[in-house]
Amino acid sequence: MTKRKGARSVKDIPSTILTQLNTGQIETANLVEWLAVDQRVLLESLLIQTNRIDYLTPVLTKIDQLKKQTVNTINEAIGTGLFELTSANNDNNFLAIMSHHKADLIRCWATYIIGKNNDLNVSETLNQIQPFSADNHFGVREICWMAVRSKIKQNLTESIEILSGWTANEDENIRRFATESTRPRGVWCEHIEELKQNPELALSILEPLKSDKAKYVQDSLGNWLNDASKTRPDFVIELCKRWETESHTKETAYSLKRALRTLNK
C-alpha cells in the first residue's frame, strides 16, 4: 500500500480526507494534517463509535478551561480527561481500544492515560509506553515521551537505569526515546534541572549511542548534548573531545557537530 504524502497546506487538504481524519478512519500523513484535525470532532466520533458519549461533555469542559489551546495542550487535556473518566468508571477496556486505533491522535491520547496513572510505578509506566515509542507515526512517538516525562523526572535515577537498557534495542525509535525523553531542556516540555546541572548522570544512555547508525538517534543525541552545553559547556566539550578520539565514525562526527552547534556559534 502506497503511503499518502499529505497536503502542503491546510487549504489543500481534500474535504474527503479531512472528514476521514476527523472521524478516525485514517491517520495523518504529515504535520499539516496533524495540525488540521479537529480533536473535538475526533473525540466525539470515537465516543459515539465506542458507546461512551457520556464522556464527551466532561472532556470538552476540560478543553474549554485551558488558558492556551494548542494541538499539544488539547491533546493532553483529552488524554487526562479520558484517564479520569476511565478510572472513575473502571473502564479498563478503553485504553486497549485507543492504543490500537487507526487514528494517530487517538493513540496519542492513550499515552496520557498511561502517563497520568499514578498507580503505575516508573518501571511499569515505561514498560507500557514502550510500544508507543516504536509507533510508526511521528506524532505518537513525540507525544508518548511528553506523556511520561514528568514521571521520568520524578524518578530520574531509576528511569535512566531502565532507559539505558533501551539503547541496545534493535528498533531505532525505541533507542531514540531514551535520549529524547531525558533531554535536559527538551522541546515543549518542562526542563530536567538535575540533568542541566549534572548531565554526567545520563552517560549510561549517551555512551552506547555515540556511533548509532540511525540519523533519528544521532539527531536526538546531538540535541541532548546541545541542551547540556547551555549549562555545562565543560562537560560537553570534554565528552566530545573524548568521543572524537575514541570513535572515528561519520555517525559520531555528525552527532558531535550537532552537540557543539551552540558553543561553536
Image (cartoon, rainbow, N blue to C red):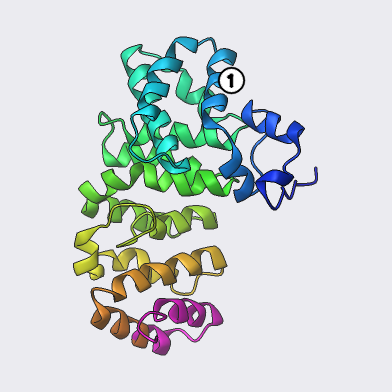
Categorize mark 1 by other alpha carbons within 10 Å: few (<14), some (14-19), many (20+).
some
Q: Residue at x 27, y 80 (%)?
A: 233
Relative depth, front residue between 44 and 246 = 44
Q: What secondary structure prevails in the magenta region? A: helix
Residue with the mark numbered 1: 45
Image coordinates of residue 217 in percent, x first then y, are 50, 64
Q: Is residue 170 visible?
A: no
The three-letter amino acid code for the residue at tag 1 is: Ser
Judge left or right: residue 58 versus residue 53.
left
Q: Which residues are magenta?
A: 242-265
* Among the 4 quarters of the image, the one containing residue 170: bottom right
Q: Secondary structure at mark 1?
A: helix
Image coordinates of residue 21 in percent, x first then y, are 65, 33
Image coordinates of residue 180 in percent, x first then y, are 41, 58
Image quarter where the N terminus lies is top right
* Among the 4 quarters of the image, the one containing residue 186: bottom left
Q: Residue at x 36, y 54 (%)?
A: 163
Judge left or right: residue 250 versus residue 245.
right
Image quarter where the C terminus lies is bottom left
Q: Residue at x 66, y 45 (%)?
A: 10
**In magenta stretch: residue 247:** yes
